[in-house]
Amino acid sequence: MAGPARRLSAKRKLVAVQRLMRGESLEAVSRDLNVPVHRLSEWRDRVLMAAESALKERERDERDDEIARLQAKVGEITMANELLYAKIDKLEGGRPLARRRSRT
């Protein structure tokens, strides 16, 4: 008779799933680890979904660095604009800027 169920770390769960992927039966791994078969099946399904998701990601290329640089630049410009608008509002004191006279 097996002892009480214990929590397994993510690493031990992955090892259990790897055993299943190598061809060990669900029942054998279940008995060995004292984990219900349905739980092992859930772990295997989650690992396969994560693997599929990881493989869908596109490879990085030189454009990614340029995109990141440009996004940072847009962020800097946006922040500078917000600071300038705040300063203008403070200087205007809630009223629009006075019109300037031409120097003619």
Image (cartoon, rainbow, N blue to C red):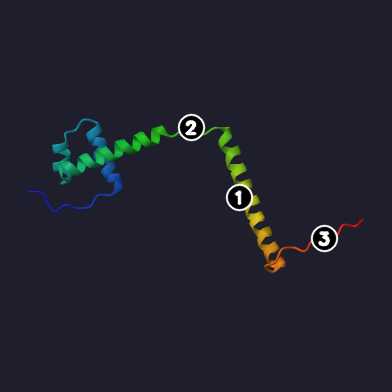
The amino acid type, in three-letter code, at marker 3 is Arg
Mark 3 and 2 residues: CB-CB less than 8 Å, in contact?
A: no
Nearest to viewer (mark 1 / mark 3): 3
Mark 2 and mark 1 lie on one chain; the one further toward the N terminus is 2
Nearer to me, 64 or 92: 92
Residue 41 placement: quadrant: top left
**Mark closest to the chain's N terminus, 3 or 2:** 2
- Asked which quadrant contains residue 49, the reply is top left
* Furthest-bottom residue in this view: 93
Residue at the spot 25% in from the left edge and 32% down from the top edge: 21
Where the C terminus falls, by quadrant?
A: bottom right
Lateral position of residue 58 relative to residue 47, left or right: right
Compared to 95, does 80 lie above or below?
Answer: above
- The CA span between labels 1 and 3 is 33 Å
Label 2 sits on residue: 59
Q: Farthest residue toward the top?
A: 23
SS label for mark 3: loop
Q: Which amino acid does label 2 sit on?
A: Glu
In this rendering, is residue 98 above or below 22?
below
The crowd level at tag 2 (other Cα within 10 Å; few <14, some 14-19, many 20+) is few
* Number of numbered discs visible in the structure rendering: 3
Element type where label 1 sits in the image: helix
- Real-space Cα distance between discs 3 and 2? 56 Å
Question: Does dot 2 land on a helix, a strand or a loop?
Answer: loop
Label annotation for residue 75? 1
Locate residue 37 relative to residue 71 in the image: left or right: left
Q: Residue 100 carries which label?
A: 3
First along the sequence among labels 1 and 3:
1
